[in-house]
């Protein structure tokens, strides 16, 4: 795959920063679409555009010419336990902006809490994250109905390990997967858009055995 122009939403978050780092290391041109440009430092192939991911009209003008959108939007940890429509509202704006600008490829982060895994561990997390799960479910419905070439990644608990080390499974969580690194999620999203793989698929992620 040659050089791509990638548009990253949620670029100042933990997964988003890993996307920026890996994408630039792979030689891609990257646009970080952020509310707070001061949190990033422009350098080389990184372009920073200020905008609101909740407003399609601020996103659409910056999108033309990009090959794919990678979205790692998520609430701050303390907000994940409260009722919110943040992720769904951002997805709605993203889909609208992409439709208006003719960019068709979207890779977006959801969460493994939406898989119907059995056992106490998953039941506990489904209960703790019930509000966030509802928001994620709405987001996924918006993305799936969008007509875009989408890929939805559902990682379990995210960790800070610096290595890229993951398994991916279509429509399921890889067996025994309890965690995966932010960097691995970023690598999966980049692989998917580079290789045009997992189009119109929900993919579970986990650490390699």
Image (cartoon, grey):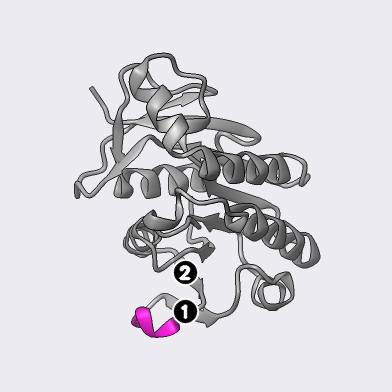
Left or right of residue 12, residue 134 in this image: right
Q: Is residue 205 above or below residue 175?
A: below
**Residue depicted at 50% across the width and 39% down the height:** 153
Q: Is residue 132 left or right of residue 186?
A: right
**Location of residue 144 in the rendering, given as x and y in whole percent from the top left corner:** 71, 39
Quarter of the view holding residue 62: bottom right
Q: Is residue 42 visible?
A: no
Q: Where residue 138 appears, x then y in whole percent?
A: 67, 43
For residue 72, which numbered disc appears in the image? Answer: none
Q: Judge whether 121 appears above or below 155 on screen.
A: above
Q: Are marks 1 and 2 in contact (CB under 8 Å)?
A: yes
Residue 99: x and y in percent read: 78, 59
60 vs 50: above or below: above
* Residue shown at the point (43%, 14%) measured from the top left: 118
Mark 1 Cα-neighbour bin, 10 Å: few <14, some 14–19, many ≥20? some
In the rendered image, which quarter is residue 180 located in? top left
Residue 91 is left or right of residue 154, and the answer is right
Residue pointed to by mark 1: 47
Q: Residue at x 26, y 27 (%)?
A: 208
- Label 1 sits on a secondary structure element that is strand
Number of residue marks = 2
- Magenta residues, start to end: 36-42
Image point 58% across, 43% down: which residue?
136
Residue 42 coordinates in the image, percent (x, y): 37, 83
Spatial CA distance of label 1 from label 2 is 6 Å
What secondary structure is found at the residue carrying circle 2?
strand
Q: Badge 2 is on which residue?
A: 30
Could you tell me if residue 151 is visible in this image? yes
Quarter of the image for the C terminus: give it.
top left
Residue 24 vs residue 7, the one in the foreground: 7
Q: Which badge, 1 or 2, is on the more N-terminal residue?
A: 2
């Amino acid at each position: 795959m040659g050089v791509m122009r990638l548009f990253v939403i949620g670029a100042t978050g933990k997964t988003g920063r890993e996307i920026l780092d890996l994408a630039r290391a792979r030689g891609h041109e990257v646009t970080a679409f952020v509310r707070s440009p001061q949190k990033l430092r422009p350098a080389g192939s990184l372009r920073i555009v200020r905008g609101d991911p909740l407003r399609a009209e601020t996103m659409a003008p910056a999108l033309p010419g990009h090959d794919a959108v990678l979205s790692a939007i998520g609430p701050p940890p303390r907000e994940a336990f409260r009722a919110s429509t943040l992720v769904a509202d951002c997805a709605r704006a993203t889909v609208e902006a992409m439709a208006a600008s003719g960019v068709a490829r979207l890779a977006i982060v959801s969460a493994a809490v939406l898989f119907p895994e059995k056992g106490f561990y998953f039941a506990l997390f489904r209960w703790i994250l019930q509000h966030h799960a509802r928001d994620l479910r709405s987001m996924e419905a918006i993305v799936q109905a969008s007509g875009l070439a989408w890929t939805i990644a559902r990682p379990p608990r995210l960790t800070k390990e610096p290595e890229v080390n993951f398994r991916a499974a279509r429509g399921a969580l890889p067996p025994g997967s309890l965690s995966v690194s932010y960097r691995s999620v970023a690598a999966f999203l980049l692989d998917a858009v580079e290789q045009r793989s997992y189009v119109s698929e929900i993919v579970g992620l986990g650490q390699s055995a």
